[in-house]
Image: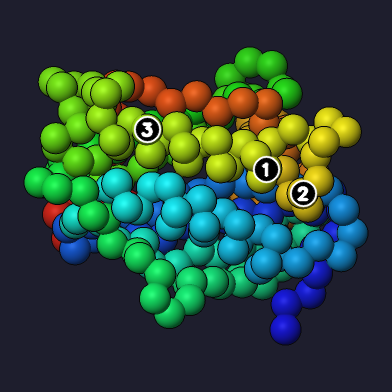
Amino acid sequence: MASPAIADEVYMVRVFGSIENQEYVNVLHFQCVVNNADIIEQLLVVMWLCFVQQLIPRSGANFELRRITAMRVAPTVGPEIEYAGVSGQLLVGQAAGDSLPSFCSAVIGIRSERAGKRGIGRFALAGVPELATVGSFISIESDYWDAINDFIACVADKFLGRGSVNFEHKFALGVLSRKSGALKPPYAVNQFSTSTFLRPSRKIGTIKSRQIGRGR
């Protein structure tokens, strides 16, 4: 049984999926804000449901969500903890038509309390429906654009707003800067900065390491 998280510990969360016979991985960082927080129920399950309830039903049919993991990376390194949903959950995209190639992504920018480039992060969403795009942009009139914004609202509601009197959750999303200290785990806790807002980009991003059958 996994040990509960302790206040100020930083966790690396990886979201795994599959698109065109290759693995899709998103890496995010969260900080525990209270003692004795449940890593599975109060971090992994909550983040998983934002994907399952908001993104997956409106993502391309060639994208499948597989699992989500968490590992403590500051101030010490801990074991990896995995969650893969429950029976009956919809984990494959349902949008009509074809999807963009696997190297194309919708991009969400992360801004944090730390000023400058060291306080900026991003993550990419695979499975962009072709019918949701116009040229090199995601159409703001598409269901998928609504899905991205609904996903952001879900994540913001659960993991942003630390320090606010209304913040009731156990983990805060943030940006971990390797330029501010160690280059690999274990990191120093002060390399993490809490996120202040998330911003979607209409411009379709590319990840050059993704090729059919390999890459991430």
Which numbered mark, 3 or 2, is in the foreground of this view?
Answer: 3
* Relative side of 149 to 129, left or right: right
Q: Dot 3 lies on which element?
A: helix
* Relative side of 163 to 121, left or right: right
Q: CA distance from mark 1 to mark 2?
A: 7 Å
**Can residue 59 be seen by looking at this rendering?**
yes
> Disc 1 marks which amino acid?
Phe
> Disc 2 marks which amino acid?
His
Residue under label 2 = 169
Circles 1 and 2, Cβ within 8 Å, touching? The answer is yes
Q: In the image, which disc is placed on residue 49? A: none
Residue under label 1 = 159
Crowding at dot 3, Cα within 10 Å, few <14 / some 14-19 / many 20+, comes out as some
Where residue 207 sits in the image (x, y, percent)? 29, 38
First-in-chain label (3 vs 2): 3
Which residue corresponds to the image point at 26% horizontal and 55% vertical from the top-left?
A: 93
Q: Is residue 22 above or below residue 177?
A: below
Residue under label 3 = 146
First-in-chain label (1 vs 3): 3
Q: Nearer the viewer, residue 203 or 215?
A: 203
Q: CA distance from mark 1 to mark 3?
A: 20 Å
Where residue 215 sits in the image (x, y, percent)? 27, 53
